[in-house]
Amino acid sequence: MTYDLASNPAAVADRRRLGVALAATGADVRAAQRLRYEVFATELAASLPSEDEGLDRDAFDPHCEHLLVRDETTGRVVGTASSSTSPRLVIGCASIPVLGDPPAAARICRRLSRDHLAPPEWRVVPRRPFRLHTTLGSADVRIPPLIRGYLKMGALVCGDAAWDADFGTADLLLALPVRRMRQPYAGRFLKAS
């Protein structure tokens, strides 16, 4: 269910109670990792290696900035995002649900690789490739909205999709060179920084 904030006073009130800041301490980073664990392991039933700790840790955490969204009334972290501070390149993972319709996910992956492939020097090879199904069918598929947004900004697909068995998704690495970022997106990002 979606709400128009202008016509929903409760949603506006909720929005005013949220504060956003970068993690400043190890405790802040652990709060982000705890929320990631809660979402990924508890809500999405993903299998994580740090299950006994109740934290979702990964090798990139020490190299990232961690954005925290807190409920200012309780101090509880309710949202988080991590980003690398590379000045020239933005990279990220785009996930395509597989379990409901593997052939459709395969068609999306093939279409993205065909139409938006990065140059050879940016290509990656997945450790666990998502196996493209041989009976793909001919029906056209809709690219998920978030991925369409990345492509509109100028993102490129860096290679074949990886299979994420924990989440049941085909994951594509996307790269967006800042110099390639299309207007008006570049202006928005630069203004925000």
Image (spheres, helix red, strand yellow):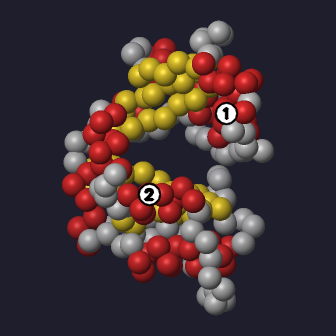
Q: Residue at x 42, y 80 (%)?
A: 114
Q: In terms of secondary structure, where does tag 2 sit?
A: helix
Nearest the eye: 150 or 173 = 150
Up-down relation of residue 131 to residue 26 (above or below): below
Up-down relation of residue 42 to residue 10 (above or below): below
Foreground tag (1 vs 2):
1
| Amino acid type assigned to the residue bearing label 2 in the image | Tyr
Indicate the position of residue 122 as horizontal and vertical percent values.
Answer: 28, 64
The residue under label 2 is: 150
Indicate the position of residue 60 as horizontal and vertical percent values.
Answer: 39, 38
Q: Residue at x 33, y 41 (%)?
A: 189
The residue under label 1 is: 5
The image shows a total of numbered marks equal to 2
Q: In terms of secondary structure, where does tag 1 sit?
A: helix
- Label 1 to label 2, Cα distance in Å? 25 Å
Indicate the position of residue 176 as horizontal and vertical percent values.
Answer: 33, 56
Q: Locate residue 53 relative to residue 43 in the image: left or right.
A: left
Decide which of tag 1 and tag 2 comes sooner along the chain: 1
**Is any atom of residue 162 visible in this view?**
yes
